[in-house]
Image: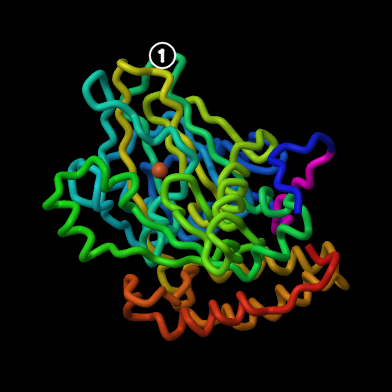
Amino acid sequence: MELKLIRGGVRELNRTSSGEPYPRFEVRPSTPVIGAELRGVDLAAELDDELRAELRRALLEFKVIFFRDQEITSTRQLEIARIWGEPEANPFFPTGDEVRISRLAKDGQMFGMENVWHSDHSFLAKPARGAVLRAAEVPDNAGDTMWADMAAAYDNLPEDVQALIDGLEAEHDWISTWGRILPDDKRDALREELPTVVHPVVKVHPGTGRRTLYVNEPFTDRILGLPEAEGQALLEYLRLQARVPEYQVRFRWAPGSVAIWDNWAVQHYAINDYYPSRRVMERVAILRVTAGTDHHSDHRAVRNIRRRSPRSPAAGRLRGRFRMRRQPHAVWDSARTAAGSQRSSGEDSRDAVYWSYISHGSRSPGGR
Ligand SMILES: [Fe+2]
């Protein structure tokens, strides 16, 4: 098995589109595969059901969506997050007007540390569904954020690597990052609440059916089920995939810019080229899909995949997955946790059925 990050040549860059128009706004795709600026939307105005549905569909298709010149309050930012699910507090970030607003204020004293490719909250049993990030103060010509499409990353892995990782799981933890900067007593207290968790190395996105690489540099520590040296070599190789430029989009912030991303589909990187200048962002993380909110757009996306390749083995697998997906509370989590790891709660029996179905479905050659 050759673990070489960059191979020159053609890359497979697929975007899963419903094929339906967006009458409520203008869409300006940023790259062939990831990112779009949506023009003509006032996020401070009423967010009616039709607009909410279009925004959900656009996020599934483009994975990160951008808005310019928005004048919104923290309260409104929370309301926007609720288009997708319930806002969630971050256990490590300082807060803004209320606890579920993370205020990321950087300057000469508090420097930016988010300049590493990562997926938010992968160290939790139920990682964030997405995030709404708003620029408050922006340095001149600096402080961009980048996102990488991790389904594209998966699609371009060699087939023998895909076959190997499809059934693997990995440990995620916050100790080696956040744990190093916390006082001992706080770290020990949080350790009780936030133990090591286990996620599949490849997750299947419930909105698009796309296989998505789910390991990241700061939080994924170990691949399970392989000899230590082999597992670390594979993990390092997989962590680096987000760095391939064809999978990426880069966004230049201005005051009033808003970005919303699908944390299940992408990783991101906050470029720290502005130190010691000041950069202030406010973020709301989205915990889970509110019951019923994703179904309409999900099913449209799947129908499109079937239209594009009606006889492909992949389409058959997707149909099977989405029959199971009709459970209203199915969320994209591994309900299986390692012994002694964080317990999932509440709706996990439904999650477990869903996840065991999609993670054990058969794969056919050529159906990727
Ligand atoms: Fe982040």
Rendered residue at 81%/73% (across/down): 364
Q: Where on the image, by quarter, is ligand 1?
A: top left
**What span is colored magenta in the figure?**
10-19
Amino acid at circle 1: Asp
Q: Quick check: can you spot residue 241?
A: yes
Q: Position of residue 366 (x, y in %)?
A: 85, 65
In the rendered view of the protein, which quadrant contains the N terminus?
Answer: bottom right
Q: Residue furthest right?
A: 311
Depth order, front residue of 277/133: 277
Give the image location of residue 93, x and y in percent: 25, 44
Front-most of residues 272 and 75: 272
* 5 shown above or below 339: above
127 is higher (above) or lower (below) than 299: above
Q: Is residue 297 visible in this depiction of the protein?
A: no
Q: Residue at x 72, y 58 (%)?
A: 161
Q: Is residue 334 left or right of residue 123?
A: right
Residue, disc 1? 140
Q: Is residue 273 above or below residue 71?
A: above
Q: Main secondary structure of the magenta part?
A: loop
Q: Is residue 78 above or below residue 246?
A: below
Residue 242, position in %: x, y? 59, 42
Which quarter shows the C terminus? bottom right
Residue in view at x 73 percent, y 51 percent: 157
Judging from the image, what secondary structure is the residue with disc 1 in? loop
The magenta stretch spans residue 359: no
Where does residue 294 sit, x and y in percent of width and height?
52, 67
Report the coloring of the rendering: rainbow
18 in the magenta segment: yes
